[in-house]
Image (cartoon, helix red, strand yellow):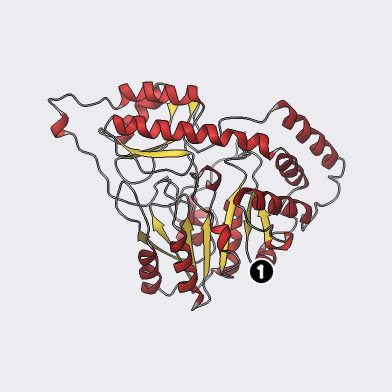
Amino acid sequence: MPTPALPDAALPAPREDLAGMEPYGAPQVEAAHLLNVNENPVGPSPALVEDIAREVARATAGLNRYPDREFLDLRADLAAFLAEESGIPAPAPQEVWAANGSNEVMHQLLLAYGGPGRTALSFAPHYSMYPEYARDTLTSWRTAERGPAPDFTLSAQDVVTAIRRERLQIVLLTSPNNPTGTALDLDVVRAAAAELAADRGLLIVDEAYAEFRRDGVPSALTLLGQHPNLVVSRTMSKAFALAGARLGYMVADRRIVDTVRIVRLPYHLSAITQAVARAALRHRRELLSTVAMLRRERDALAEHLRQRGHDVAPSDANFVLFTVRRDRHEVWQSLLDQGVLVREVGPPGWLRVSIGTPEDNAAFRRALETADPEPTAATADDTTTATTPGREDA
């Protein structure tokens, strides 16, 4: 017989600030064209699959033992990749840290530098997990607004003004930003780091989509030597097409890394994850060869949307944020009914579409003709879209 359900009053009481909360997550539904969570649509090659299988088999033989707690070999491999990708001197392995996705990296940073009586801030619209990191670590959370649509830019003065309004311990900047795709000028990073340094505050620059940035857009990694309070976070989920492997990492002054090591859970990075990540890094040229194709597809899709009359945020990421003419949920549902899943996220009146294969992107363009048809001459004057910035809402 099934166990009868207990009344809520019989259950342990959770933290009061968790009442009514829902777990994070984008809709996971079946669709022919999955363009909602910014994944790389090109999977690993047979050669990479074979290499990963071989390394995982080797790691599996030792699973009766705990994994390498410090994983310095993986950290050295990540440092070598960053030197190659961003044109910086290779960081020491001790200046690199990795965890189960960049989400865990951020969580560990707020565990180490946030907490009761401390405040973190970011600029809306932003990645919706940022305030959840603060909530989980009992860190106070503040937001300021990015510039107006469709560019959603952020200036050095915007950042300095927001920092001076609050007594902050942590500022989170994102470049390229999710959900807008907007990249930061390095003057913004310099100004934020300098302003925070006066009160020994921490600046985190989230570069989850950095490999997709346009030519000539620099990485905040180039500023690490000038600002000891700067952390740059990356991930292998996007450009490396390893969303299922869960490997994120950061680069920072060794003293920051050592502080994060205090709050990490024991043996947090499994032997399997380490083996998969190191194998993928050996195949980085192959994996990153898809980036150029996705950038071309992104730029072509953004131009197509502009020609249809949509406002489009300039994107240095592997997605495009654009306005719609109809109710955005109706547009989202119509696209899904046609087999195309996008993200209902960002300011009211906007949708975000991840860049897929050429076939995925063509399917999206066809579906959009029905989901959000171009106005006729008779109705064009009555067509409006909402462009008010706001927090990412999914």
Work out whether residue 9 or residue 17 is closer to the camera in this orientation and state it: 17
Amino acid, disc 1: Thr
Work out whether residue 237 or residue 119 is closer to the camera in this orientation and state it: 237
| Residue at 46%, 48% in the rendered image | 22
Task: Give the residue number, with chain letter if any, for mark 1.
Answer: 259
Q: Locate residue 298, reporting x and y percent.
A: 45, 34
In the depicted structure, whether residue 185 falls above or below residue 394: below
**Left or right relative to 303: residue 79:** right
Which part of the image, by quadrant, shows the C terminus? top left
Which part of the image, by quadrant, shows the N terminus? top right
Q: Locate residue 49, reporting x and y percent.
A: 73, 30
Q: Secondary structure at mark 1?
A: helix
**Left or right relative to 179: residue 242:** right
Q: Residues within 10 Å of mark 1 (few under 14, many from 20)?
A: some
| Residue at 41%, 31% in the rendered image | 300
Q: Is residue 10 visible?
A: yes
**Left or right relative to 170: residue 349:** left
Q: Is residue 339 visible?
A: no
In the depicted structure, whether residue 391 falls above or below residue 139: above
In the depicted structure, whether residue 71 falls above or below residue 305: below
Q: Locate residue 36, reporting x and y percent.
A: 46, 35
Q: Locate residue 147, reporting x and y percent.
A: 32, 55
Task: Report which quarter residue 333 is drawn in.
Answer: top left
Q: Residue furthest bottom?
A: 198
Work out whether residue 57 or residue 81 is closer to the camera in this orientation and state it: 81
| Residue at 37%, 45% in the rendered image | 346
| Residue at 74%, 48% in the rendered image | 270
Task: Report which quarter residue 252 is drawn in.
Answer: bottom right
